Amino acid sequence: MTRRQRIAACSTALLPLLCVTLPAWGAELGLPVLHSAPDGHGGQDWTLPVQALAAMTVITLLPALLLVMTSFTRIMIVLALMRQALGTGQTPSNQILIGLALLMTALIMQPTFKAMWANGAQPYMDQTVSFQTALDNGVKPLRAFMLRQTREDTLLFYAKLSHHESFATPDDVPFPLLAGAFLTSELKTAFEIGFLLYIPFMIIDLVVASVLMGMGMMMLSPMIISAPFKLLLFVLVDGWTLVLGTLVGSFHT
């Protein structure tokens, strides 16, 4: 085992012990222990260490949450497929595509993020609601966004996998189930858009290949000849604007 693997194995082994002994040590030293208490309004108010731990966990999982719960996945897949259809290799680079996908994600998710801040984070910072209430209210706009993008047949498929018969209201859908259905729906929609993007470039490749075969130039790669024509077509129709506009319009906001 490498040094990094040994450290990871030791950390994993010590984690249950720390979870058992840390509250006891904190109580002996007079520190706040990890627990929740009634807030006086029928809810639960978590102690500061629990809230700090939750915040650190969210920050650590932020890249995964960005992929699973926002529009980033669909945008990134479509841009990557478009680059392959153009046949430009690694141009634009992955960094440029990720940056563009992040900007488009911020644009699309802006109303949802504003609603999450207004309903959850801001009241909690003003100390008008408890932590649990702020969390529940803040997640609602994100759930609504994810439900609008999720296909009904995909949601029913995940409900069948998790042995759920049906849901009376959208609020009854468990969040892990909704996240899985949302991500699968995003993958399906992204590949559908990618297929439509491939069609005009595939036609150009077929025409160029047929012409070269008719001229007896079988040793010449059709990709070398078709690449300039595909780039010319993409520029003439203002392809970036069309693709990005289609992506924004494909989300039900």
Image (cartoon, rainbow, N blue to C red):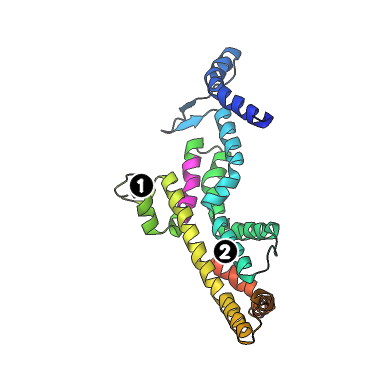
- The residue that appears at 52% across and 51% down in the rendered structure is 69
Dividing the picture into quarters, in which one does residue 197 lie? bottom right
Pinpoint residue 175: horizontal percent, then vertical percent: 43, 45
Label 2 secondary element: helix
- In the rendered structure, the answer to whether residue 227 lies left or right of residue 35 reads right
Image coords of residue 143 (percent x, y): 46, 51
Vertical order, 140 against 10 (above or below): below
State the residue at coordinates (66%, 82%): 217
In this figure, which residue is indicated by the disc labeled 2?
Answer: 78
Q: If the image is split into quadrants, where does the N terminus sit?
A: top right
Instruction: Farthest residue to the left: give it.
Output: 165
**Residue 240 coordinates in the image, percent (x, y):** 64, 71
Q: Position of residue 84 (x, y in %)?
A: 62, 66
Q: Nearer the viewer, residue 209 or 109?
A: 209
- Find numbered disc 1 in the image and state the secondary structure of the residue it sits on: helix
Other residues around mark 2 within 10 Å, as few (<14) / some (14–19) / many (≥20):
many
Is residue 235 located in the magenta-colored stretch of the structure?
Answer: no
Magenta stretch prevailing secondary structure = helix
Res 126 seen here: no
Q: Dot 1 surroundings within 10 Å: few (below 14), some, or many (20 or more)?
A: few
Q: Is residue 7 left or right of residue 23?
A: right
Check residue 161 in the rendering and tell me which mark sits there, or answer none: 1
Say if residue 31 shows up in the picture.
Answer: yes
For the residue pair 90 and 216, the one nearer the viewer reads as 216
The three-letter code of the residue at mark 2 reads: Val
Of residue 94 and residue 168, the one placed in the foreground of this image is 94
Under mark 1, the amino acid is: Leu
Magenta stretch: give its range.
Answer: 134-146
Q: Pick whichever of labels 1 and 2 is earlier in the sequence.
A: 2
Work out whether residue 240 or residue 92 is closer to the camera in this orientation and state it.
Answer: 92
Q: Is residue 138 magenta?
A: yes
